[in-house]
Image: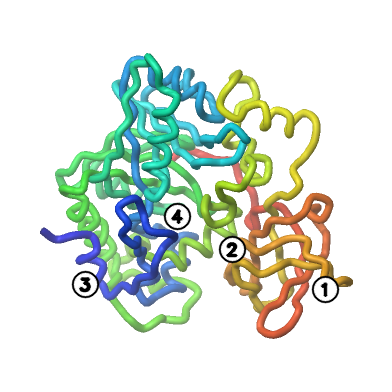
Amino acid sequence: MTTIRDIQETALATFMPFGQPANDDKLIEVVDTFGQYEAEYASTRKGAAIFSVPHRSVIEVRGTERRDFLHKMVTHDTLSLKPGLGRRAFLLGRTGRIIADLIILEESDRTLLVTDRADVSNIIRELNNYIVMEDVQLRGLDDAQQMSIHGPLSGAILDEIAGQPVGPLEAFAHRPIEIAGVRGTVHRFDQTGSMGLHLIFPDQGAADVYARLLERARQDGWKPDTTDDSSSSPPTPRDGKTRIRPAGWLAFNTARIEAGSPLFHIDFGPDSLPAETGLVSQVVSFTKGCYLGQEIVARMHNLGHPKRTLVGLRFTDDRMPIAGTAVTDPAKASEVIGGITSSTISPMLGNIAIALAVMKWGRHRAGEVVAAPAEGASVTATVQELTFLPVTPTGSA
């Protein structure tokens, strides 16, 4: 049986390891690039870029009391969710630290939790610990395959491929979709500064869906090429249609850092509090009542602030500190005041280095000048809010 990996290898993709081994102890690999990084990135900004997402998985929650149970467990409201709606939420431990980052999709007879594949077993184990008499059952959908399309023309492209309108979709809303005769689910989660449509299909048929997406890209003029075209925009499509192409992690990572979209296990992790992530307004409800870890979240919100928080760093040139690099006071190189979590060269900002960083409270404020080592020198950066792109209201697909 042909797999998505087989199709990617035929398309001359190169691969890179992603994170720690998943629950089955197999190393997860994602596409690094299809050999045309600049064009792949440009598609996220001007057209539509197709990504395979093997590091993401799904947990199915069934039972008549599932919404009430989840409401008591996660940081956002699930009781008010109607079929077709969704929310982003954290699952916390008793100390308020983050166990998992979840996209919660409500259906008529079940709830789906979209999360990192490496966290599935831990999430199920943690939630099962709190099920006593409730009618709630959880299981990992090991055969669920995910892919996504990012870019301003993603909705139009998906409408065309599916043969029917997919939208409108507000943030985290979802609906059934059929591509290449395979039934699945599409939900919206914008991570790159423009529309992001995420597809969930069963393993049996997922490769057919991915092949159909790449077929559409070929109709646009894309073809496998190991030579980077070193262009800031994709080539003109042969038939004059919309720009669409498969893309890899390098392009996605650049776009999502520019958009200020931190990732669990990369920019924050199991040692982080929600208040440290810059995502509180998106993942926490302060009116829903009690949930696991709620007291710590409420106390931080009402009485104080975290010791550290995620911010954006804008450097002055293209010298780029790598993830894990310490951030220091420019006047006191020995005084560590933060650390780089993600970094990239930003095409949108004239090819200067930018980064997401965890900074000590008090040194996190916009306009603060900091320093970090890069390419054998100490380079300076200015602290700013997480996003490096103009902020626009979230619209419909």
What residue is shown with label 1?
333
Q: Earlier in the sequence, mark 4 or mark 1?
A: 4
The amino acid beneath tag 4 is: Gly
Mark 4–mark 2 CB contact (< 8 Å) = no
Secondary structure at numbered mark 3:
helix
What residue is shown with label 3?
10
Give the quarter of the figure containing the C terminus. top left
- Residue 168 in view here: no
Secondary structure at numbered mark 1:
strand
Q: Position of residue 11 (x, y in %)?
A: 25, 72
Mark 1–mark 2 CB contact (< 8 Å) = no
**Nearest the camera: 105 or 395?**
105
Mark 3–mark 4 CB contact (< 8 Å) = no
Q: CA distance from mark 3 to mark 4?
A: 24 Å
Q: Residues within 10 Å of mark 2 (few under 14, many from 20)?
A: many
Q: Earlier in the sequence, mark 3 or mark 2?
A: 3
What residue is shown with label 4?
151
Q: Residues within 10 Å of mark 1 (few under 14, many from 20)?
A: some
Q: CA distance from mark 4 to mark 1?
A: 40 Å
Q: CA distance from mark 1 to mark 2?
A: 21 Å
**Nearest the camera: 7 or 364?**
364
Looking at the image, residue 161 sits to the left or right of residue 365; the answer is left
